[in-house]
Structure formats: structure tokens, C-alpha cells
Amino acid sequence: MSIQQNEALVAAVHNLGYESVDDFALQKAKEALQAQIDAYQKEVAQYEKKYGMSFEAFTEKFDQKTEFGLFERED
């Protein structure tokens, strides 16, 4: 990145209200991670509704399957 590009980036970040490029990057990383967490929580909620039990109960039931129930477990 050239000096001019770096200065333009710093100016743009300051215009957005951030103290530094690092602060901007940290905030955007947090937002991206929160969006991913929200998507996973939504997916878990859909499965909990579908199977009528909490994720923890489903996991416990899933782990109790024996070799004889392996096909059912994988299905």
C-alpha cells in the first residue's frame, strides 16, 4: 500500500468516527463474528423446533445410540 493510500485509509476511518484503523478493524471483526453467532443460534433454534427438544437433549440422545442404532444415528 502506498503512503497516499495509507493516508486516505486513515482519513476515511477517522471520518467514520474511529480513532484508528486498528479500532475500525476490531469493530468490523466483532460485527462479523456476532453475525455468524446469530446465524448459528438461528439454526440451532430451527433444529430445536423441528425435533421438539433442546440442542443439549438432542446431543445426549444422539450420543446414546449404540452400534445397532448406527444407521439411525447417521441418518
Image: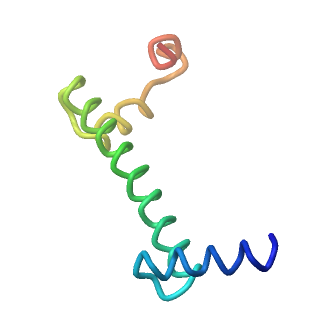
Direction bottom: furthest residue: 19
Question: Residue 17 occupies which quadrant of the picture?
Answer: bottom left
Viewed as shown, does residue 16 lie left or right of 67?
left
Residue drawn at 51 percent across, 65 percent down:
29
Residue drawn at 79 percent across, 79 percent down:
3
Viewed as shown, does residue 22 lie left or right of 30?
right
Residue drawn at 46 percent across, 57 percent down:
32
Residue placed most toward the observer, 48 or 17: 17
Q: x, y (%) of residue 73?
A: 47, 19
Number of numbered labels in the structure image: 0
How are the residues colored? Answer: rainbow
Which quadrant would the N terminus be assigned to in this image? bottom right
Q: x, y (%) of residue 62?
A: 40, 30
Residue placed most toward the observer, 17 or 69: 17
Please determine whether, in this image, residue 24 is positioned above or below residue 28.
below
Residue drawn at 32 percent across, 38 percent down:
44
Direction front: furthest residue: 4
Viewed as shown, does residue 2 lie left or right of 28?
right
Q: x, y (%) of residue 24?
A: 51, 75
Q: x, y (%) of residue 19?
A: 49, 88
Residue placed most toward the observer, 32 or 8: 8
Please determine whether, in this image, residue 6 is positioned above or below residue 33.
below
Please determine whether, in this image, residue 12 is positioned above or below residue 28.
below
Direction right: furthest residue: 2
